[in-house]
Image (tube, rainbow, N blue to C red):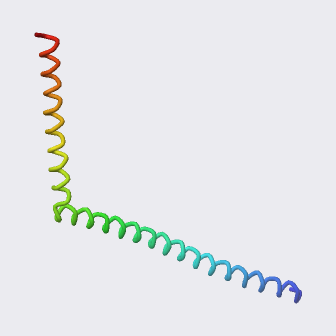
């Protein structure tokens, strides 16, 4: 083998090893980024669930349900009055 060929072969071997090491590093970084994104999403979801549980425990949800229920009852009463008025005016 000529000296230039030996230099070329050793340079190619060094580059191949460098590329292999870089590929492994990039693969590890991708895995870390994927894990980080998953952990972040899971943390956000758990915080949202905790917030919702706290609202339920604090009674905010119960309060809103009572307000909505009373609004529905009032609407039913108003509709009932309108129907009775309609019946009295048109069918009597």
Pick out the residue farthest to the top.
92
Q: Is residue 3 above or below residue 73?
A: below
- Where is residue 20 drawn, in percent x and y? 64, 78
Q: Name which residue lies at 45% across and 73% down.
A: 36
Q: Is residue 43 left or right of residue 28?
A: left
Front residue (pair 53, 12): 53
Q: Is residue 59 above or below residue 70?
A: below
Q: Is residue 90 above or below residue 75?
A: above
Q: Is residue 17 left or right of residue 67?
A: right
- Where is residue 89 drawn, in percent x and y? 15, 14
Q: Name which residue lies at 42% across and 68% down.
A: 38
Q: Quadrant of the C terminus?
A: top left
Q: Is residue 70 above or below residue 1?
A: above
- Where is residue 50 drawn, in percent x and y? 26, 67
Q: Name which residue lies at 88% across and 89% down.
A: 3
Q: Quadrant of the N terminus?
A: bottom right
Pick out the residue farthest to the front.
89
The quadrant in which residue 8 appears is bottom right
Front residue (pair 15, 6): 15
Q: Is residue 26 left or right of residue 63?
A: right
The quadrant in which residue 61 appears is bottom left
Q: Name which residue lies at 16% across and 32% down.
A: 78
């Amino acid at each position: 083998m000529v000296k230039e060929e030996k230099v070329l072969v050793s340079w190619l071997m060094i580059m191949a090893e460098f590329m292999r090491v870089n590929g492994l590093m990039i693969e590890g970084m991708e895995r870390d980024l994927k894990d980080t994104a998953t952990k972040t999403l899971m943390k956000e979801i758990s915080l949202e669930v905790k917030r919702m549980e706290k609202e339920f425990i604090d009674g905010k949800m119960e309060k809103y349900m009572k307000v909505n229920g009373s609004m529905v009852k009032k609407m039913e009463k108003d509709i009932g009055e309108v129907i009775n008025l309609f019946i009295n005016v048109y069918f009597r």
